[in-house]
Image (tube, rainbow, N blue to C red):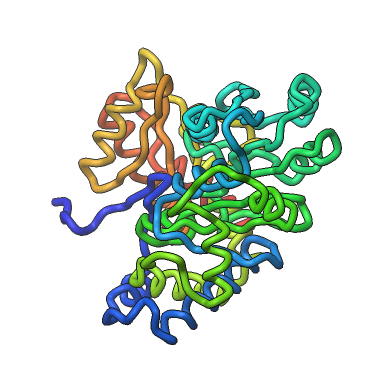
């Protein structure tokens, strides 16, 4: 028997929500312009700065992560401006689509899916397009499980151009190292439903001094996504429009949980989850999509069995026993499956996923030695 309300949600977002966060979001409603709400907004902004690695004010938008990507584009660029977008998968391409939609000139640096951007590739692209005003990166490419070396890439941009560095950190911030100021990131965006262990509905943004100058001089109109309005209102400890108050309650509790664990420990935990997952997958004879060097600590992509077995059949069997993993996107649909291991996730969860994989692989006719994947993960866990 499978209980309807008991299952393992292991997709790369939305992710499971801790009970204390659920309880926080169930608090009675308060006025969004009250002193109590202002105190929450102020504290959340300050705590986000520690996770982003910035002294800049962190802004909170009541909208999806994609809205923050759009805000990053339209606040620094005008129609006709040139931008370089590094695409390593679906979400890098999303940045490019936003740039195209607003009639900016979009130059794509297309990287093979499953691989991280190499600094030499970036240098060549910057030489080909010396007048770009911004370079857009995806820190973790959710569609492939790649973690791009943002520290090195940002440094490369600043060494070879005057462009701003804009980073989509939606599917990894709160789980990986991030030093926005030291690394030279000009705009960093993330969302609530990934490593921040919340429902969808909040986007968080931080902006460098250089980017604020660009934004202030940008004549393009914007309204709900005008970051200048958010900065002005944040100085008054509020937001320009009605915030998602219940999500703010949850964010306050999430930031408390992260501080309690300590960000260094949070980062180590996610690294362990990645290594356990990859060891277990290899022990089962399955093929990982990314190299160890390029792999993200928040999501792992595994290739399907081609003609031997179907990743979609495997996902169906997993779902039947209450384990939800993600499939592939665009041309990878039906060719890979993806396991999310970020946020409210620990080593026991990885052991459960691998055990479920072993059973489900048997059911679709791909025999594996039961316990082999779990054992490999446990050995990583023991030696951590």
Relative placement, left or right, of 357 versus 285 is left
Q: How many numbered marks have been drawn onto this rendered protein structure?
A: 0
Image location (x, y in percent) of residue 293: 68, 37
Residue sitting nearer the eye, 312 or 29? 29
Q: Nearer the viewer, residue 15 or 368?
A: 15
Task: Report the front residue among 382 and 294.
Answer: 294
315 relative to 107, above or below = below
Of residues 201 and 299, the one drawn nearer to the viewer in this rendering: 201
Q: Residue at x 52, y 47 (%)?
A: 71
Percent x, y of residue 171: 51, 48
* Residue situated furthest right in the rendering: 159
Where residue 16 sits, quadrant-wise, is bottom left
Q: Is residue 148 above or below residue 335?
A: below
Residue 203 is situated, as x and y percent measured from the top left of the image, at: 47, 56
Q: Report if residue 228 is visible in the image.
A: yes
Q: Residue 110 in the image: x percent, y percent?
A: 61, 22
The residue positioned farthest toward the bottom in the image shown = 35
Identity of the residue drawn at 27% across and 82% down: 28
- In the rendered view of the protein, which quadrant contains the C terminus? bottom right
User: Would you say 106 lies left or right of 186 here?
Assistant: left
Q: Is residue 285 visible from the viewing direction of this image? A: no
Relative to 160, does residue 192 appear above or below in the rendering? below
Residue 323 lies, with reference to residue 96, above or below; the image says below
Q: Residue at x 58, y 72 (%)?
A: 47
> In the drawing, does residue 32 fall left or right of residue 81?
left
Q: Residue furthest front?
A: 219
Q: Residue furthest top?
A: 307
Residue 153 sits in which quadrant? Answer: top right
Q: Please report the residue visible at 80 percent of the width from the left and 27 percent of the height from the top.
A: 123
């Amino acid at each position: 028997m499978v209980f309807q309300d008991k299952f393992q949600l292991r997709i790369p977002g939305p992710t499971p929500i801790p009970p204390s966060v659920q309880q926080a979001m169930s608090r009675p409603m308060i006025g969004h312009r009250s002193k109590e709400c202002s105190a929450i907004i102020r504290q959340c902004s300050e705590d986000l700065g520690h996770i982003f690695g910035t002294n800049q004010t962190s802004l909170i938008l009541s909208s999806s992560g994609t809205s923050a990507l759009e805000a990053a584009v339209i606040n620094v660029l005008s129609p006709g401006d040139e931008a370089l977008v590094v695409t390593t998968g679906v979400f890098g391409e999303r940045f490019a689509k936003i740039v195209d939609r607003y009639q900016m000139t979009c130059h794509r640096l297309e990287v093979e899916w499953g691989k991280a951007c190499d600094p030499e590739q970036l240098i060549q692209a910057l030489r080909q397009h010396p007048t770009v005003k911004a370079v857009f990166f995806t820190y973790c490419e959710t569609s492939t499980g790649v973690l791009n070396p943002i520290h090195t890439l940002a440094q490369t941009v600043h060494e070879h151009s005057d462009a701003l560095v804009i980073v989509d950190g939606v599917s990894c911030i709160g789980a990986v190292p991030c030093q926005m100021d030291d690394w030279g990131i000009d705009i960093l965006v993330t969302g609530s439903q990934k490593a921040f262990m919340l429902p969808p509905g909040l986007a968080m943004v931080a902006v460098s001094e250089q980017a604020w100058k660009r934004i202030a001089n940008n004549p393009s109109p914007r309204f709900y996504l005008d970051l200048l309005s958010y900065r002005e209102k944040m100085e008054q400890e509020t937001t320009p429009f009605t915030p998602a108050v219940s999500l703010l309650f949850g964010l306050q509790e999430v930031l408390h949980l992260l501080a309690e664990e300590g960000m260094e420990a949070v980062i180590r935990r996610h690294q362990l989850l990645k290594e356990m997952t990859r060891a277990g997958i290899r022990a089962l004879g399955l093929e990982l999509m990314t190299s160890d060097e390029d792999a993200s600590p928040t999501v792992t992509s595994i290739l399907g069995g081609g003609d031997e077995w179907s990743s979609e059949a495997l996902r169906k069997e997993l779902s039947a026993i209450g384990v939800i993993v993600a499939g592939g996107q665009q041309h990878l649909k039906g060719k890979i499956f993806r396991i999310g291991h970020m946020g409210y996730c620990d080593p026991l969860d990885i052991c459960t996923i691998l055990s479920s994989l072993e059973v489900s692989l048997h059911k679709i006719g791909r025999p594996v030695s039961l316990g082999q994947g779990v054992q490999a993960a446990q050995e990583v866990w023991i030696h951590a």
